[in-house]
Image (cartoon, grey):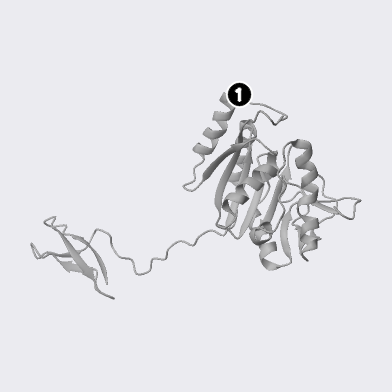
Amino acid sequence: MTSFKFVCEACGNVSDQLLKPKMNHYLRCPSCSNFGRYWHNQFDWNYKSPERAEVCLVVNCFWPDRLSKFLKYFETYEEGIPYDLVFVHNVFDKHDVVNRQARTDAQINEVRRHISNLNLNSKTLIERDNVGEDLGASRHVFNLLCDNYKYFFFINEVSEILCDNWLKKFIDVMKSDNRVVACGPKVIRKNDNKFKYIICSTYWGLDSSFGKRLIWPPPTNRAESKAQEMQLLWPQAKALGYNIAQVGSGDDILHYSNVPATSTVGEGIY
């Protein structure tokens, strides 16, 4: 049984009604006997509650002009799958951390304004201490939300989206092969057996269950975060019997417009 309010369109009387299974949607008003359709809280037998997104898309942001450019790409191309959108803003400077660059209050507020103006019903802004740049931001959001999502995809504001279904392409690779626990558009090979392959922290996807087993070192500055980027994924994935993957050719799905990293391995599983 489902209860609801019946509002008579003839006399305006409001009365409680009880909707029985397969009951006709037309009812007789108890006050004026008008026979009409109920109008308030109409029960829809075909209604299905929306599915909860299993993907969290995390956009690391800092510079307003770069974020503005990224959002134009973001609004142009379809992601291809449901997701929840989280912006993480490296906004608060700490006195004990020396960052490479500083911004004015106007620039900080402009970043906030770009996010506020984005025409999406569901978006979250997380503001944090500017520690560890991209890798620190990704670590911060993952630790906050890792229990809420099956997959994460982290992307920097300097990324250029190049095709529709771009997010789906990465998630599909992890879904289709349970050996693959992390992926990105560009994998770099090093002449180092310990740190043989690197996924750039500019843009990369992660299976949440693997992320919970990662040792996430807390980066404090640019030099440390780049060194930890080498150590973060591939060595730990291989130690647990997993792989990482490059999705695409390296410049057909996502591209890094500011001194782009060069893929050295090509599409595949490593």
Q: Position of residue 57 (x, y in %)?
A: 60, 50
Q: Position of residue 92 (x, y in %)?
A: 60, 32
Left or right of 112 on screen, residue 235: right
Left or right of 24 on screen, residue 250: right
Q: Position of residue 190 (x, y in %)?
A: 88, 50
Q: Which residue does the image show at 69% across and 30% down from the upper left?
A: 96
Residue 13 occupies quadrant: bottom left
Residue 26 occupies quadrant: bottom left
Q: Which residue does the image show at 74% across and 51% down from the upper left?
A: 252
Question: Which residue matches tag 1?
Answer: 104
- From the viewer's side, name the closer residue of 61 and 193: 193
Q: Which residue does the image show at 73% across and 45% down from the upper left?
A: 255
- From the viewer's side, name the closer residue of 156 and 255: 156
Amino acid bearing label 1: Thr
Say which quadrant the N terminus sits in.
Answer: bottom left
Q: Farthest residue in the left direction?
A: 32
**Disc 1, SS:** loop
Q: Farthest residue in the right direction?
A: 191
Left or right of 250 on screen, residue 8: left
